Amino acid sequence: MRRKQTIEEIRYYKSYIDDFIHSKNKGYQLPEDYVWLDERPHHRALSSVIYHLAWICSFFYVRLFRRIKIKNRKVLRKCRKRGYFLYGNHTQPVGDVFTPAYICGRKRIYTIAGQENMGLPGIGRLLPLLGALPVPDTLSQMKLFLEAIHRRIEENCCVVIYPEAHVWPYYTKIRPFPLTSFWFPVEYGVSAFCMTVTYQKKKQGRKPGMTIYMDGPFYPDKSLGKKEAQKKLHDEIFNCMQRRSSRSSYEYIRYRKEKHL
């Protein structure tokens, strides 16, 4: 007989852009002279040291602490000598920082992030060294931001994107996300992969087990115009992630839409 699932918590949302991680830094803005590509030797050396320490932490987090299962990781080998974009569902405040680094192994990752994260006490100063690429507000800064992303792709790195934008802890479905972030693979003519986090009931402990499915590579269709190619790539990855999300079998937190009377 199948054991009845126990819902640990129910959360209510108004729209898919609701934010369940509340931060005191929501109003933080990047300084006008913020640097996305800091080429100073001491900065590059420090960044390398801190990133490798973080990768070691990611190993312990994935393998020992959370014991995350990763399926189909071998697909990344097809582009191990080239830069690519990696899309994922945003369901773990801490895990979404560590797991891509572990999954990509020796390939350095950089992650597109909200600028409010740069204002976090203590950790905010470390994030740029770890590879965070904060999204700016102004057009002048946007040019520098795009140049940084292009440079990292040319350096054969992985750029991680969470197109859902906001973290919904333990959410088991895929929220609708815009076409915007799929501009990058089309514009730079490189491949994309997706990682889908799913959740399963464990025999012991309250929190669910995690299985991550890797898929790809997905390539921009060069026979189409940029807008059409962007939409096609978006649809392919979204549909793939939706299929993978059906492998979740346990809702640790259930999300329900608020009813308007």
Image (tube, rainbow, N blue to C red):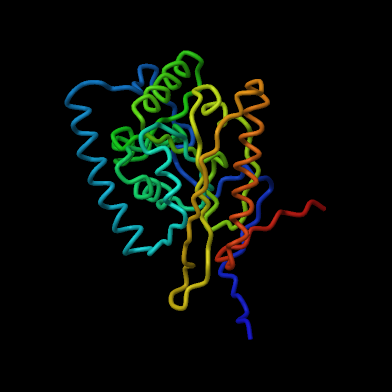
Question: Which residue: 37% across, 27% down?
Answer: 152
Image side of residue 202 versus residue 1, left or right? left
- 248 vs 132, left or right, is right
Q: Is residue 200 above or below residue 97?
A: below
- Residue at (56% x, 45% y) in the render: 19
- Count the labels in the image: 0
Q: Does 237 sit left or right of 30 as displayed?
A: right
Would you identify the image quadrant in which residue 165 lies?
A: top right
Q: Residue at x 82, y 53 (%)?
A: 261
Q: What percent of the width, then of the height, locates residue 146?
A: 45, 21
Quadrant position of the N terminus in the picture? bottom right
Residue at the far bottom: name it: 1
Q: Residue furthest top?
A: 140
User: Based on the displayed image, in which of its 4 quarters is residue 68 positioned?
Assistant: bottom left
Q: Position of residue 229 (x, y in %)?
A: 64, 27
Residue 254: x %, y % from top left: 62, 62
Relative to the observer, which residue lies in front, 135 or 184? Answer: 184
Q: Position of residue 113 (x, y in %)?
A: 45, 35
Q: As displayed, is residue 244 above or below residue 192? A: below
**Residue 226, placed above or below residue 216:** above
User: Which quarter of the figure has residue 247?
Assistant: bottom right
Of residue 178 and residue 253, the one placed in the foreground of this image is 178
Residue shown at 32% from the left, 52% from the top: 58
Residue sitting nearer the eye, 12 or 225:
225
Q: Is residue 2 above or below residue 99?
A: below
Q: In this view of the protein, which residue sits in the foreground, 135 or 48? A: 48
